[in-house]
Image: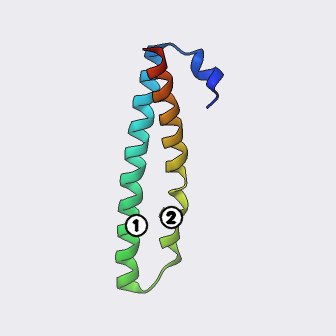
Amino acid sequence: MNQQELSSLSIEELKKKETAIKTVVWMLAIVLVGALCFFIFISFRDGITPLIAVPFALAAILPMNLKNLKSLKTEIESRK
């Protein structure tokens, strides 16, 4: 997210975006933990499966969203 893009948004839009990103981060984290548990269970039952790599590969999305969330928070704090 560009700093210029954030500076052009109103405080209400920033808070709305912050809430949306928080929701997405939590939902993604819950789905990834659930998928990891499911694939571990399948691995114990049927033998090792390469699908266990999927939650680890998709976990790379979380740091990007957390970085965007941090930049939103700093922009909101700078306006107060």
- Left or right of 9: which side holds 34? left
* Corner quadrant of residue 6: top right
In the rendered image, residue 34, in percent from the top left (x then y), is placed at 35, 61
Residue at left offset 55%, top offset 45%: 64
Task: Please tell me which residue lies in front, 41 or 78.
Answer: 78
What is the quadrant of the C terminus in the image?
A: top left
Residue 65 appears left or right of 46? right
Residue 15 image point, x, y percent? 42, 22
Mark before the other along the chain sequence, 2 or 1: 1
* Residue 23 spot, x, y in % from top left: 38, 38
Q: Is residue 11 above or below residue 63?
A: above
Residue 76: mark: none
Q: Amino acid at mark 2?
A: Phe
Residue 21 screen position, x and y as percent: 45, 35
80 in relation to 24, above or below:
above
The residue carrying mark 1 is 36
Measure how far apart labels 2 and 1 are at the Cα level: 8 Å
Residue identified by numbered label 2: 56
**Residue at left 36%, top 83%?**
44
Label 1 CA crowd tier, 10 Å (few <14, some 14–19, many 20+): some
SS of the residue under disc 2: helix
Res 45 → quadrant? bottom left
Q: Is residue 38 left or right of residue 55?
A: left
Q: Taking 57 as reference, is 2 left or right?
A: right
Q: Nearer the viewer, residue 53 or 73?
A: 73
Residue at left offset 39%, top offset 30%: 19
Check contact, mark 2 vs mark 1: CB within 8 A: yes
The residue located at (47%, 18%) in the rendering is: 13
What type is the residue that disc 1 sits on? Answer: Leu
Instruction: Kindly indicate the quadrant of the structure image that contains residue 26.
Output: top left
| Extreme-bottom residue of the structure | 47
**Please, what secondary structure does the residue beneath circle 1 have?**
helix
